[in-house]
Image: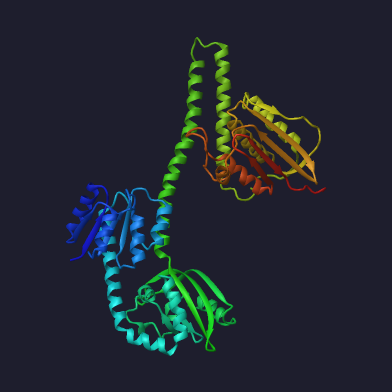
Amino acid sequence: MDKILIIDDEEDIRIALKRVLSREGYQIELSESATNAVQRIESGETFSIVISDILMSGMSGIDFTKFIADKNINLPVILITGNPNLSSAEAAIRYHAYEYISKPVDRTQLLSVVKRALEVKNQKDSDLEKLMLSEKLEKALRTQNLDLNRQNAAILNATSDAVITINHKLVIVSANKSSFDMFRYHSPLDLIGQNVRMLFTENKMQKYMNQVSNVLSQEPNKSTLQLSDVTLQRSDSSTFLADIAICSYSLDGDSYYTGVIRDVTQKKLMVEQLIHSERRAFLSVVAASIGHEINNSLTAIQGFVEMASRENADLMLKDRALKVTLNQTEKLRALTSNLLQLGKSVKSTNEKLETLNLNSEISSVLQVFKETAKLKYCQIKREDSDTIIPIRMNSDQFALLLSNILLNAADATNNIGTIEIKAYFEDKKGHLIVTDDGEGMSPETLEKIYEPYFTTKELGKGTGLGMFVVKQIVDNFEIHLEIDSTPGKGSKFHFIFPEVSET
């Protein structure tokens, strides 16, 4: 009877898992900590599978998996977690965890994973037994080519991936144990002595063989080849994805080529599952943020309109209601503009490029802010100038660009700081510098500033679209942007526009 060890520091979870697996006829052992499980294994107790939580006091599930990997024990470890993330998934892959399951654990999924894990373990145990029977054959091969096997032995001892060596005739001359596991060959003779073509699928064979031939045509000891996401074929005709690194060398005048093969199928599946989970959580946060932003504006508009609609409402209240409505609708318009800008990777055919006067465009944007009462508490420093500074872009896009920068500057100063705007012409290029005396940005924030929906503001006080839209616009119009910011000392945004030809 297969014996399964369940490790979890929560008794209720241990009992629940035991109840599910016991009904399927498995013998279940329980452990409240990974440390206790390690002691039991080191004392000689054997198990068919281990199911372990990741986050536990003391030794974690990842540490336990590393212990099994370091001991090179054929014991599949199934990790379960209530907080899946890329870091834990990568650690699980690195230490060869068999599977990575998110809580709450689905009964059908758990039973399926346990069944497959047992099959893999039993197959490995069987292959190992068969491999031991082939020791005489391996000794004969090592005797025939001792130098080659010494070099391969160094590689075999350094990796758990499949390592296969072929000669210049494309015949497999040696393979490590992981090769038989990976390609599911029961006897070394089923693989060694065969043509390497048997490892490739029929429809991809010519493509990969051409790449292998390029390595074979090079001078030994000087050629290497890296192949990613290669489709390989097992003995049962099933396929899997692998990354392959091939090196060549010469021994006793003969050329040999060793390939290190890493199965990345499970890794890709786990990463895709995590990305899917994170994407759903990410969209929920985004929807909440944008929805809160819209609701705030609509609530303000509705409240003031209702007060202004009363019979006893005076002109002052009606005037205030009108200003609030205009301000909030402008806020919604800016949000809509940012949303519509998303996804534009090239200039739209509807965006008419024209030669603009940078100074005039700045004045137009500031006039809009003045009329809508935006930045009313900020001090704007700018020297008016009649100097014509030509730039080549779209007026609406420039307005969206500068508006986002000014709104971010206002937020950084809590709407009571100083914003300085400077424009000049140098080396046939227009320059625009916007400086604020706000809270500034840390290096960590600067690294993420262009990510969509990244914001340091509270929920409902920002959507994180402003700088993402700015990045799209500067890329579309080939504008160079330099940002200088220090926490507590404000920020400076320096835009350098492309040179405008005389024509």
Task: Look at the picture and state if 215 lies above or below 363.
Answer: below
Residue at screen point 48% across, 23% down: 302
Residue at screen point 34% across, 50% down: 55
Outermost top residue: 312
Left or right: where 78 falls relative to 483: left
Q: Would residue 201 be visible to someone looking at this image?
A: no
Left or right: where 257 falls relative to 431: left
Residue at screen point 57% across, 17% down: 320
Residue 184, horizontal then vertical, whole percent: 34, 75
Q: Along the line of sight, which residue is nearer the eye, 49 or 356?
A: 49
Residue at screen point 57% across, 82% down: 220
Q: Quarter holding the N terminus?
A: bottom left
Task: Look at the picture and state if 205 lies above or below 48.
Answer: below
Q: Would residue 322 be visible to someone looking at this image?
A: yes
Q: Along the line of sight, which residue is nearer the eye, 376 or 143?
A: 143
Left or right: where 341 falls relative to 81: right
Residue 460, horizontal then vertical, whole percent: 48, 33
Residue 285, horizontal then vertical, whole percent: 44, 40
Residue 209, horizontal then vertical, whole percent: 51, 79
Q: How is the image coloured?
A: rainbow
Numbered circles on residues, count: 0
Left or right: where 407 falls relative to 267: right
